[in-house]
Image (cartoon, helix red, strand yellow):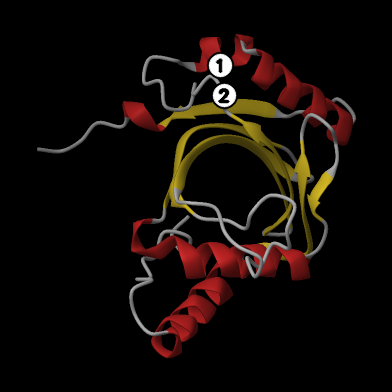
Amino acid sequence: MEAYNEPIPNNIPPEKRLPLVENKLKRFMAQFDDKVQILDLKSGQTIIKDRNLFIKRYTCVFRESGSKLQGSCLKRFYFDSSGPTYCIDYEMHESLVTAMPGTPPDGKLGVRDPRTEHLIVLYEEKGGKLTRMWLRPDSEKLGSDTYAGEDILAASEAYKQFEAKLKEVTGGKLGERIFHNYHDIPSVG
């Protein structure tokens, strides 16, 4: 999220903005495997099938979203294991601009207006790189609910769907579950 959240103004000439986008994208992509995929949790359909499309999507996001783009992980379930590790993140993305639905991910056929998107994402990590992500909307906005703790999230239909996917991909070996509610972090001052 550090690279994702680096501000790039979109009110500067392309010859100045595009090198900033390229540098940000390079730092962002360093976290992802060469075979990275984004999948829809509910349907199992591939949203982004390979690194090339992944790069096109995030080039559009970083180029078009401007300096107000902000991604936050609000809550996380982390599953420790000796093989791949997994986490389920409850995220909020503000001022997100993406390509129009049904068009190429690079935005060349138009982009959506800036929006706030609430997502739940299951990340798979192997060898220090993110390899696959399954996502679905956080339609109940449980991630943003400061009072929704581990028990409430674990009882939700969304969490149960992610847990079923985890059991499928791990052969039922989830590892220890560790929960973080980033709303509970005390502030100083």
Badge 2 crowding class, 10 Å Cα cut-off, few under 14, some 14 to 19, many 20 or more, is few
Q: Specify the quadrant of the image occupied by residue 16.
A: bottom left
The answer to whether residue 121 is left or right of residue 170 is left
From the viewer's side, name the closer residue of 115 and 159: 115
Q: Specify the quadrant of the image occupied by residue 7.
A: bottom left
Q: Earlier in the sequence, mark 2 or mark 1?
A: 2
Closer to the observer: label 2 or label 1?
Answer: 2
Amino acid beneath label 1: Leu
Secondary structure category for the residue under label 2: loop
The residue beneath circle 2 is 139
Secondary structure category for the residue under label 1: helix
Amino acid beneath label 2: Ser
From the viewer's side, name the closer residue of 12 and 8: 12
> CB under 8 Å between callouts 2 and 1?
no
The residue beneath circle 1 is 153
> Residue sitting at 62 percent across and 12 percent down?
156
Indicate which disc residue 53 carries: none
